[in-house]
Structure formats: structure tokens, C-alpha cells
């Protein structure tokens, strides 16, 4: 069965960076796009971007352009999301979510979420 | 950026009642690239519907989606106790793939 297992909670100071991992199993890793979505406490969902695990190409929301990076390691079926220059507003639960073989896709499988807290 | 507006913000209903949730898009969505998700406290969202009206695997047939262009609806024909939670729509036809702000379905 498809599983996405994310790394544990992080506490960071403003200005620092955080890198969250998402290990996939139960399917062919390189065949499906992986998306990242975040949710601030008590708020809605915000789509952050997507990575093609096959070639590594990425697309991000303009709001985070320049601060976000997404990479993958095909040898371990893991994708990574790194967010830099952290601000208090970046405090949120970060989810990886698997799309389909097409970049224009719904999100069927989700990781358990990783809480990132930004606080001085 | 396509803005999705969901209504109402909160829906207070009793088990067995019909729920109708709306999602309006600021621009027409090509090929009905719209999905619906359910989220319960402390958990990741769960996919319910994609392509505006196709039920995801394992989703009961009391959930149905409809609409095209800029107006979309999620209907829960008869609410079960486990259906209470927050529902989000998402468009995935134009980057950034935006979400609506959510509709909370609560027990009356």
C-alpha cells in the first residue's frame, strides 16, 4: 500500500532554514509527482509546490519563490522540502502529498504532516 | 492566481440530513480540474472527489460532486456521524493549485 512517512517536528529560530523529508513506499517513486502543502494553526491549506521525482523539475507558488527548494533522492524514494529565511508566519504543519503521473493532478495520498514551529 | 470561495463557512446539520457545500472559482476551471477533501482535527486531508465529480477509491456513494466552469458543489446525501469535519475544494488546473478556505460541517 502507498505510504508517505515524514520526518519529525522541528523548532527553528527566525532566519534559519528547515528541511523536511518524505519517504515514499508502495509504488514506483519516479512515476508520480509529489506536492507539498502547508497549514498554519487553525487555518486553511496552502499549496507550496510540486516536484517531478523522475527528473527533479519543480514548480513553486510565487509567494515562496526564492525561499523554497524541493529535491529528491531516487535511491531512497525520498523527497525533501527546504524552506529558508524562516519567519513566524511559516509556523505550520507541512504535508507531502502524492499526485498522479500528470503535473495537473489531485492529491490522493498524504503524509502524516510535520509541524514546524518558528520562534525566537 | 485562481481564487476559490467556499460557502457557507459553517454548516450545522443533524445526522441523516443532506449537506450542500459550494465552491466558486474566480476563473473558469479547464477540464473541471477540481477536487474535494475532508479533514478531521489533527489528521491529513482525505481525497473525496476529483475531476469535479469522480469519487476517489473507497469513498461512499453518499458523497457526490457536480459543477463546471466556475461553480461547483459537493453534496452529502445523508450525513453520517463520521462525516463531520472541514471540507476543502482545490483547483489543480492552473499553478498555483489553490484551495478554498474550507466549510466546517458540524453537528447541530
Image (spheres, coloured by chain):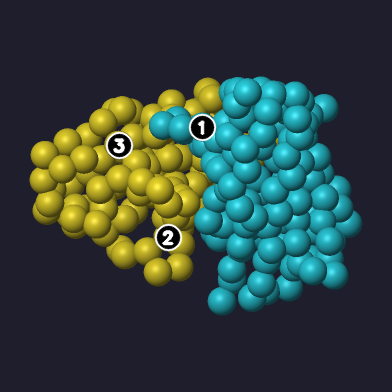
Chain colours: A cyan, B yellow
- Residue B9 percent across, percent down from the top left: 31, 28
Front-most of residues A85 and A109: A85
Q: What element carries label 2?
A: strand
Q: In which quarter of the image is residue B22?
A: top left
Q: Quadrant of residue A79?
A: bottom right
- Residue B95 percent across, percent down from the top left: 69, 35
Which residue matches tag 2? B55
Q: Which of marks 1 and 2 is in front?
A: 1
Residue B91 visible (yes or no): no
Chain ID of residue with mark 1: A
Q: Nearer the viewer, mark 3 or mark 1?
A: 1
Q: Residues within 10 Å of mark 2 (few under 14, many from 20)?
A: some
Q: Which mark is residue B104?
A: 3
Picture residue at 85% right of the left edge, 70% below the top: A75
Chain ID of residue with mark 2: B
Rounded to the nearest whole Å, what is the CA distance between mark 1 and mark 2?
Answer: 28 Å
Q: Nearer the viewer, mark 3 or mark 2?
A: 3
Q: In the shown orientation, is residue A65 left or right of residue B26? A: right
Picture residue at 58% right of the left edge, 34% below the top: A117
Chain ID of residue with mark 3: B
Q: In the shown orientation, is residue A58 left or right of residue A10? A: right
Which residue matches tag 1? A40
Q: Earlier in the sequence, mark 3 or mark 2?
A: 2
Rounded to the nearest whole Å, what is the CA distance between mark 3 and mark 1?
Answer: 17 Å
Q: Is mark 1 on a helix, strand or loop?
A: loop
Vertical placement of residue B30 versus A62, above or below? below
Vertical placement of residue B85 versus A100, above or below? above
Q: In which quarter of the image is the N terminus of chain B?
A: top right
Amino acid at each position: 500500500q502507498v505510504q508517505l512517512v515524514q520526518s519529525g517536528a522541528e523548532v527553528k529560530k527566525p532566519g534559519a532554514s528547515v528541511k523536511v523529508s518524505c519517504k515514499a513506499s508502495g509504488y514506483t517513486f519516479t512515476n508520480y509527482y509529489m506536492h507539498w502543502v502547508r497549514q498554519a494553526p487553525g487555518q486553511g491549506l496552502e499549496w507550496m509546490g510540486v516536484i517531478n521525482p523522475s527528473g527533479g523539475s519543480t514548480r513553486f507558488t510565487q509567494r515562496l519563490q526564492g525561499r523554497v527548494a524541493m529535491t529528491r533522492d531516487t535511491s531512497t524514494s525520498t523527497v525533501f522540502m527546504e524552506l529558508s529565511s524562516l519567519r513566524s508566519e511559516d509556523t505550520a504543519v507541512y504535508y507531502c502529498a502524492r499526485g498522479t503521473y500528470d503535473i495537473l493532478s489531485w492529491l490522493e495520498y498524504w503524509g502524516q504532516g510535520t509541524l514546524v514551529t518558528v520562534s525566537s | 492566481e485562481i481564487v476559490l470561495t467556499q460557502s457557507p463557512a459553517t454548516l450545522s446539520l443533524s445526522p441523516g440530513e443532506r449537506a450542500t457545500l459550494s465552491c466558486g472559482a474566480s476563473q473558469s476551471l479547464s477540464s473541471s480540474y477540481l477536487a474535494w477533501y475532508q479533514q478531521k482535527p489533527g489528521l491529513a486531508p482525505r481525497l473525496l472527489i476529483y475531476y469535479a465529480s469522480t469519487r476517489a477509491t473507497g469513498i461512499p456513494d453518499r458523497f457526490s460532486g457536480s459543477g463546471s466552469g466556475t461553480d461547483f458543489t459537493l453534496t452529502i446525501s445523508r450525513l453520517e456521524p463520521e462525516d463531520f469535519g472541514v471540507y476543502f475544494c482545490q483547483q489543480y488546473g492552473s499553478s498555483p493549485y489553490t484551495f478554498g478556505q474550507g466549510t466546517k460541517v458540524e453537528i447541530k
